[in-house]
């Protein structure tokens, strides 16, 4: 076990180091998978390229995602180890404001990890967490991984599923089942990003509070207008904008 790192306030990378520490702590608690630490490193690299801020294409995706959540009949937030380590309170808050179920669905599946993730959510106010030791589970067709088992009351019935930090093939399977998928992924090139209905290319740490506040902003908007906002969103065009943003930023930095 590592000694917790004492991060000097004036360290130029203090925020990033604090986030790393949260991941390490949640790994030691048993919530984050070993591979989750590697996944975080990959995310950090893309975040550098994005300038570690929520850019305009991400803001547009957040607005469309909020509209989609508000028009959904049965939205579900899918939660894994990294997501709960980074934004536990925001997951609970979004589930309340968007009236969405929370379901634990992990790639490296053990009952022990499921229970730890559930308890971290309950500690910050979650009252109903699906997907843990479920008698009532169903399998997603065409999916080989442990993620195929989903709650019959949650992801299986959902029309809209939020899938942050996804591993890839499940998004495709959910889309094939006729569901709409909102991804939050720092990598605009990932399979998840390209297959999702709406991809927010941003760090979950920044995107989640903005998504919650956008849900509040749009709450009183007419359903027909919300539908237009969600349907007018073009994921491919938005991902192209994120890539262009990175390219232009790097060109500028390169002088
Ligand atoms: O908890 P489990 O068992 O379900 O395992 C979860 C991990 C994350 C290990 C699993 O889903 C996995 O292996 O994911 P990948 O294939 O590494 O993909 C994770 C994606 O999330 C990558 O495209 C990363 O760039 C991205 N990512 C990493 N950190 C963040 C992120 N996106 C948004 N915010 C982050 N903080």
Image (spheres, grey):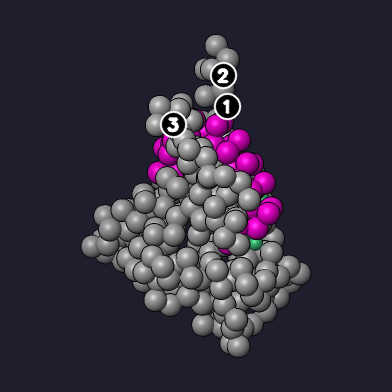
Q: Nearer the viewer, mark 2 or mark 3?
A: 3
Kindly identify the residue that appears in the image at 64 percent across and 41 percent down.
42
Does the segment drawn in magenta span residue 47?
yes
Residue 119 position (above or below residue 192): below
The answer to whether marks 2 and 1 mark residues whose Cβ atoms lie closer than 8 Å is yes
At mark 1, the secondary structure is helix
As drawn, the label of residue 247 is 1
Looking at the image, the residue that sits furthest to the top is 255
Residue 215, position as x, y percentages in the image: 32, 58
The answer to whether marks 2 and 3 mark residues whose Cβ atoms lie closer than 8 Å is no
Residue 114, position as x, y percentages in the image: 59, 71
- Main SS, magenta region, reads helix
Residues shaded magenta: 31-59
Residue 53 position (above or below residue 207): above
Query: Residue 227: which quarter of the image?
Result: bottom left
As drawn, the label of residue 8 is 3
At mark 2, the secondary structure is helix
Disc 2 target residue: 251
Q: Nearer the viewer, residue 125 or 224?
A: 125
Residue 44, position as x, y percentages in the image: 58, 38
Mark-to-mark CA distance, 2 and 1: 6 Å
Residue 36, position as x, y percentages in the image: 64, 53
Q: Nearer the viewer, residue 227 or 32?
A: 32
Mark-to-mark CA distance, 2 and 3: 32 Å
Q: Nearer the viewer, mark 3 or mark 1?
A: 3
Tell me: 188 left or right of 64: right
């Amino acid at each position: 076990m590592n000694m917790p790192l004492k991060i000097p306030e004036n360290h130029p990378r203090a925020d990033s180091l604090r986030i790393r520490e949260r991941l390490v702590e949640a790994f030691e608690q048993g919530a984050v998978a070993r591979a989750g630490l590697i996944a975080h490193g990959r995310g950090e690299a893309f975040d550098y390229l994005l300038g570690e801020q929520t850019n305009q294409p991400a803001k547009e995706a957040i607005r469309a995602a909020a509209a989609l959540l508000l028009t959904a009949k049965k939205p579900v937030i899918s939660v894994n180890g990294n997501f709960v380590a980074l934004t536990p309170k925001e997951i609970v808050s979004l589930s309340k404001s968007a009236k969405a179920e929370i379901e634990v669905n992990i790639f490296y599946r053990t009952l022990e990890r499921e229970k730890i993730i559930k308890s971290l959510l309950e500690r910050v106010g979650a009252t109903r967490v699906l997907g843990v030791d479920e008698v009532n589970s169903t399998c997603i067709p065409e999916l080989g991984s442990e993620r195929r088992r989903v709650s019959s009351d949650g992801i299986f019935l959902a029309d809209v599923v939020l899938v942050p930090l996804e591993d890839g093939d499940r998004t495709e399977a959910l889309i094939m089942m006729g569901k709409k998928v909102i991804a939050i992924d720092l990598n605009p090139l990932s399979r998840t990003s390209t297959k999702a209905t709406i991809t927010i290319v941003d760090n979950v740490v920044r995107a989640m509070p903005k998504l919650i506040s956008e849900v509040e902003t749009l709450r009183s908007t007419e359903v027909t207008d919300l539908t237009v906002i969600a349907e007018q969103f073009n994921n491919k065009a938005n991902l192209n904008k994120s890539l262009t943003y990175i390219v232009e930023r790097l060109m500028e930095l390169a002088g």
